[in-house]
Image (cartoon, rainbow, N blue to C red):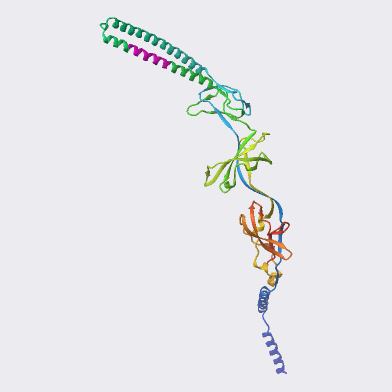
């Protein structure tokens, strides 16, 4: 009986020793999870390689190629009126925005000193003219004396007077003749000085040289005008604001397509919803270089009959360099669409992990390449899937390309974007 109980105790002890620790159980479970995860991740599956396409239909239309440039509006003829004389401004007769005509008085300087100069010149002229009369009298006197001496010499058969006396008389005549010429020249000089002083008096009255509008007035009555080395500008007059010019700077990359006579349109900030028509008048051969940027000044003629435009406004011009009608138009985005090699296969490998945790669709990476005339390829969507075709590009603008007919026809569906589901 004792031996039997002992054996049972030993059996119970042996069973307690064979029990597995809880930590080992957790370790086995974690290892099993890692193995199952690896199996699910690397287990091959079948991927549904379907693309989602964004398409546009080929249409016929007009392709317009244009160049943009910015500049300032100016009058066709702008004159700056200044004063050559210094003095006090006595009167100003016009103000800004006033219309003026040729010969109309704009302002007057104080002419008191100028009138005094005229009177002095007149008096000097009288003195010079009196000197002429005196010199002529002297010439007549010495000429008469010489004549008498020669008559006396002739009657006395050369006995009297002495030869030296006759020579002296001849010299007196010549000096009198020279004196007469000198006084006559002095008279002409006095007349010139008088005319100059009278001209200064006339210049004290500022008149309009053209028909136009006063854009700016820079003088007030009572102010002093100082004209030393340069005539100060007192008035700025625009000849005709109904016809204006837009001066823009065209980039050197675009100037080769700009020619006189091309049509264009522009906008100004004052009227953002209105487009004004213009025409290229002249493209300068001389370049303007600012911070290594080369531009060429270009003048556009502008019709401003309604006077809504004003000098100095900033205009953003669009110059039409090419216009092609009835062309097949392809969006430029179509030439930037690319596909991976899987587009040619129906099935590819896809993991079970990818099936359980699918990723969102992403558009295929596109490289932006500037479109240029020439041959290029694009993708069309047909019943059998995408097909790549080659087309000839005739012209390109910011959004569309005009292609030659033949390779593609109207109403064809052009792929402009593609995306697919990826693991």
Quarter the N terminus occupies? bottom right
Residue 175: within the magenta? yes
348 or 343, which is in the foreground?
A: 343
Above or below 260: residue 236: above
Residue 132: image quadrant is top left
Task: Report if residue 354 is visible in the image.
Answer: yes
Q: Position of residue 12 (x, y in %)?
A: 70, 87
- Magenta residues, start to end: 172-186
Q: Position of residue 311 (x, y in %)?
A: 61, 35
Query: Residue at image x 65%, y 59%?
Result: 391
272 or 406, which is in the foreground?
A: 406
Query: Residue at image x 68%, y 85%?
Result: 16
Above or below 242: residue 183: above
Q: Position of residue 191 (x, y in %)?
A: 46, 17
The secondary structure making up most of the magenta span is helix
The answer to whether residue 153 is left or right of residue 238 is left
């Amino acid at each position: 009986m004792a031996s039997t109980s002992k054996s049972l105790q030993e059996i119970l002890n042996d069973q307690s020793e064979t029990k597995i620790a809880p930590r080992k159980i957790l370790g086995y479970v974690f290892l099993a999870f890692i193995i199952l995860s690896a199996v699910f991740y690397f287990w091959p599956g079948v991927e549904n390689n379907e693309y989602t396409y964004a398409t546009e239909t080929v249409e016929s239309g007009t392709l317009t190629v244009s160049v943009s440039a910015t500049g300032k509006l100016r009058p066709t003829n702008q004159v700056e009126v200044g004063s050559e004389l210094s003095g006090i401004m006595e009167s100003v007769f016009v103000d800004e925005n006033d219309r003026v005509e040729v010969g109309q008085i704009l302002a007057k300087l104080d002419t008191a000193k100028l009138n005094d100069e005229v009177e002095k010149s007149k008096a000097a002229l009288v003195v010079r003219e009196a000197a002429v009369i005196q010199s002529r009298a002297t010439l007549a006197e010495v000429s008469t004396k010489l004549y008498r001496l020669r008559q006396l010499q002739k009657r006395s058969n050369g006995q009297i007077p002495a030869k030296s006396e006759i020579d002296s008389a001849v010299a007196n005549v010549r000096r009198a003749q020279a004196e007469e010429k000198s006084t006559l020249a002095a008279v002409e000089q006095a007349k010139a000085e008088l005319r100059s002083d009278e001209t200064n008096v006339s210049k004290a009255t500022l008149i309009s040289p053209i028909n136009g509008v006063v854009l700016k007035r820079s003088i007030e009555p009572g102010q002093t005008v100082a004209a030393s080395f340069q005539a100060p500008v007192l008035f700025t007059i625009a000849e005709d604001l109904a016809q204006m010019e837009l001066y823009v700077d065209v980039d050197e990359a675009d100037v080769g397509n700009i020619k006189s006579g091309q049509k264009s349109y522009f906008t100004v900030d004052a009227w953002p919803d209105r487009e004004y028509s213009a025409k290229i008048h002249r493209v300068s051969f001389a370049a303007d270089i600012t911070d290594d940027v080369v531009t060429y000044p270009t003048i556009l003629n502008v019709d401003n009959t309604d006077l809504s435009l004003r000098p100095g406004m900033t205009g953003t011009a669009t110059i039409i360099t090419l216009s092609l009608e009835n062309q097949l138009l392809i969006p430029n985005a179509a030439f930037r669409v690319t596909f991976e090699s899987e587009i040619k296969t129906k099935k590819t490998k896809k993991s079970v992990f990818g099936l359980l945790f699918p990723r969102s669709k992403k558009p295929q990476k596109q490289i932006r390449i500037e479109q240029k005339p020439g041959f290029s390829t694009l993708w069309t969507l047909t019943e059998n899937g995408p097909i790549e075709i080659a087309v000839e590009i005739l012209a390109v603008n910011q959004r569309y390309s005009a292609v030659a007919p033949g390779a593609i026809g109207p109403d064809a569906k052009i792929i402009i974007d593609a995306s697919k589901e990826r693991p």
